[in-house]
Amino acid sequence: MSPISRRRFLEIGFTLALVGALGASVKFMPRPRLVRPPGALVEEEFLSKCIRCGLCVENCLTGTLSPAPLSMGLAVWGTPRIDPLKAPCEAVKGRCENVLPCVRACPTEALVFVDSKFIKLGTVVWIRENCLPVKYKLECLVCQEVCPVGAVDNKGMIPVFRKEKCVGCGKCVYACPAIPKALYLSPIGERRVATTR
Amino acid sequence: MKEELQLLDRVRALSRLGFLSVLGLFKKLGLVQGILAFAKIGFICIACPLGVLQAFIASLFISFELALGFLTTVLVLWILGRAFCGWLCPIGFIPHKSSRSFYSAPLIVAAFLFGSFLLHLPLFCLICPIGFSFKIIFFVILGIFDPVTIVALGLWTLIIYFLNRKYAYWCGYICPIGFLQGLLAPKPLLRIEAGENCIKCGRCALMCPSGINLAEISWKSRLRCTLCLECLDNCPTRSIKLVFLRKTVKN
């Protein structure tokens, strides 16, 4: 073996080791669960099909979709997520009902068209301490006013969220006047599409 | 590396800058959608060939639009060859000379495709410096300022700068996209040929960033041609020509 070919061998080995290290870090680093746009496939299939092109984000009518930044994890960065702090999703009883511009825009079929009755992006989570009626004894209930599916009841002046009715559109999170917000959107309970391979 | 910047280098740098700014402007105006992983201008789709291949291998499925984008890209590659590398790729801003061969790039393409298959996601897209640059434009337009992304982009640019500085280690040896572009278009319609006046002085091989000797060019070495036109600029007998559609001149 001549010295130059040994050097090449080392370089190739080193580069392949780096690729392996990248793969291992993608595999073993914890992946955050993000709230995905309507019609998203189950997470593993979604990540395998999505090429992070951003077409869904650009076609979103409300501006709730945004690409996940790198700080959310190497494996998911660039993929679309619902950000209710920017805007709510209107896929259920809103402008996008049965239109779903994000799904129409997706070139990879990582998002597929679904009936609006199927859509459940996640569930809203109530943070009791931040809620204005609890914190300052104010009359608020903005969340109940904006909820498109009637998932918010009230007990006295305090909101009660019904998890089974919530579709995770994030309208209440967007509208919540408390600072910091008394609500956040979690992907718990999301309904995703599973295609058979 | 204290060579003076030649006119051609400046023109190429301007072309890259122009490409980035035109793309940014078009994005801002809504004329072009997506980033280079998959971009759409009206009905025309363009897709990154490596991105499509990885997504295909990761999910064992290819959608119609993605296949269309892939075919369009292959068509463009058949016509223009690797002109993207030489004239448009933002990584080309990092100055480099004297990359010699592609000996590790096929292995790296295979490694990333295998990794995509194992991990079920397009592996190279996560670190692709080209994708990084376009995503940053996208993020700026959307108003996302994520310090981690910006710091990572800075570090990555620095690493690629050091890889490219002396031997063009990134562009010449690692970049799987460049290699795949060459592989998809081994003999593009627009290409560099040496004519009858060639005296086989070897100056083209000396000036070529990929070290191609046009007097004895093979399909393997043509994979490395990025149409940078250094050879054309430096040929002492002016026998090197940019040919389109013509057959190879045999001397």
Image (cartoon, rainbow, N blue to C red):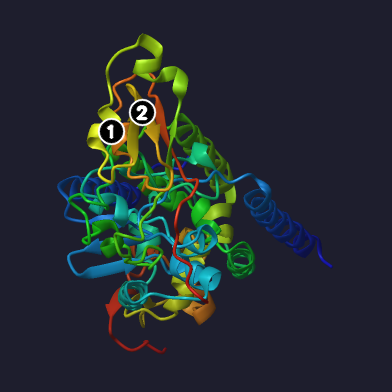
Q: Residue furthest front?
A: A156
The quadrant where residue B119 appears = bottom right
Position of B30 with respect to B137 (left or right) is left
Q: Measured from the top left, where is residue B251 in percent x and y?
A: 42, 89
Instruction: Give the quadrant of the N terminus of chain A.
Output: bottom right
| Residue nearest the observer in this picture, B82 or B43 | B43
Label 1 Cα crowd, 10 Å radius (few <14 / some 14-19 / many 20+): some
- Residue A159, numbered label: 2
Label 2 Cα crowd, 10 Å radius (few <14 / some 14-19 / many 20+): many
Mark toward the start of the polypeptide (2 vs 1) = 1
| Residue nearest the observer in this picture, B140 or B223 | B140
Q: Amino acid at mark 1?
A: Gln
Residues at discs 2 and 1 in contact (Cβ within 8 Å): yes
Q: Measured from the top left, where is residue B124 in percent x and y?
A: 53, 58
| Residue nearest the observer in this picture, B203 or B9 | B9
The chain letter under disc 1 is A
Q: Residue furthest right?
A: A1
Q: Can residue B224 be seen at all in this image of the molecule? A: no
Element under disc 2: strand
Is A23 placed above or below B143 here? below
Q: Amino acid at mark 2?
A: Pro
- Residue A144, numbered label: 1
